[in-house]
Image (cartoon, grey):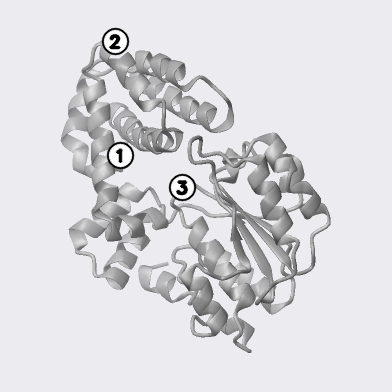
Amino acid sequence: MNAVTANDASHWGVFGHDWAVDYLRKGLRHGRTRQAYLFTGTPGIGKTTLAHAFAAALNCQHPDVDARPCGECRSCRVIASGNHPDILYAEEDDSSGTLKIEALRDLMRRLALKPYDARYRVAIVPGFERARGPAQDAILKTLEEPPPYAVLILLANGMENTLATIQSRCQIVYLKPVAAEIIAGMLRARYGTEDERAVLIARLSGGRIGWAVQAVHDDSVLEQRGTALDLLESLLRQSRRDRFALANDLAGDKPALLRLLELWQTYWRDLLLLSVGNSVKPVNIDRIATLEQLSRVLRVESVETALRQTQRAQTLIQGTNVNVRLLLEVLFLDYPAA
């Protein structure tokens, strides 16, 4: 499949996930819309874009189902503006980034009301992997007895923390990473991105097309990524005391920390691939000189441990009430010295 094919597959504004669009559109065409969906995939892969497009398709006023969402009717325009009264969103806690039980209960209460100005009332819940068990229980009653006019769309980076009772009542849509060639082609064709920059962003995206589009439009995305990797490279040269001080500084902002750990994992993966002589191209191609230098001085076992412990730290922060500062102190002790 080439980039042109991917771009022409649908008018939903969703790229690289043709099969998901086709699947959801087929349900609309045959009147088999489910009451609950779970879109899952890595951060930035396009879950939110797909959810918004699906919400628009559900409520589009165009007489031809296959033409929905048309992008031109009143419903499509209001949904695109973000102000549609029947498109609801769950609010995350600002300090912890988790979904609180009170917020989900309120969302379910509003979802149960009849639509004000649409065919369906749609609730979109991002970051569902960060909802604790009791908070997830808050939506079970709605899933067991859903109103016929309500559609619930849960978005989760992974399935590990989602209750089996939730999964069994949802139609699960797995979004897989998109090939770098497709992403680069889409960036060139749709946004006029210069070739070298398109290739770099496509490689850095790790198959996350949403992240790639954001990086094209917002220079701060690449700047923040650069700052994060600079911090990791600096950390490898720091003393134990400086590492503990950094752990204390990073522990207070969980959402930012999770993004940081995700970026660090790409770096450790690249370093591991180079250390074992794997032919797979590194993701962080603009850091190749430093990565190659580190691969010559660090033991493979220490790189492997750093990657594994970074993944473990991210999982614990997402799914438990772990002491973040202490966890980071232990993690940084596991990191090798360069």
Count of marks placed on residues: 3
Q: Tell me the quarter of the picture where residue 301 sits.
A: top left
Asked whether residue 116 appears in the rendered view, the answer is yes
Residue contact at pointers 3 and 2, CB within 8 angstroms: no
Which corner quadrant of the image does residue 120 belong to? Answer: bottom right
User: Of the residues shown, which amino acid type is indicated by label 3?
Assistant: Pro
Q: From this view, report whether residue 268 is shown above or below residue 36.
A: above
Viewer-nearest residue: 287 or 324: 324
Label number found at residue 279: 1
Residue at disc 3, secondary structure? loop
Residue 128 in percent (x, y) is at: 60, 45
Residue 331: assigned label: none
- The image position of residue 248, as x and y in percent, is 36, 20
**Residue 312: x %, y % from top left:** 49, 25
- Measure how far apart labels 1 and 2 are at the Cα level: 34 Å
Mark 3 = which residue? Answer: 43
Q: CA distance from mark 3 to mark 2?
A: 32 Å
Q: Earlier in the sequence, mark 1 or mark 2?
A: 2
- Residue located beneath label 2 in the image: 240
Residue kind at label 2, given as amino acid type: Arg
Does residue 103 lie above or below 50 as drawn? Answer: above
Residue at left 63%, top 36%?
A: 161
User: Looking at the image, which residue is at 58% across and 68% down?
Assistant: 54
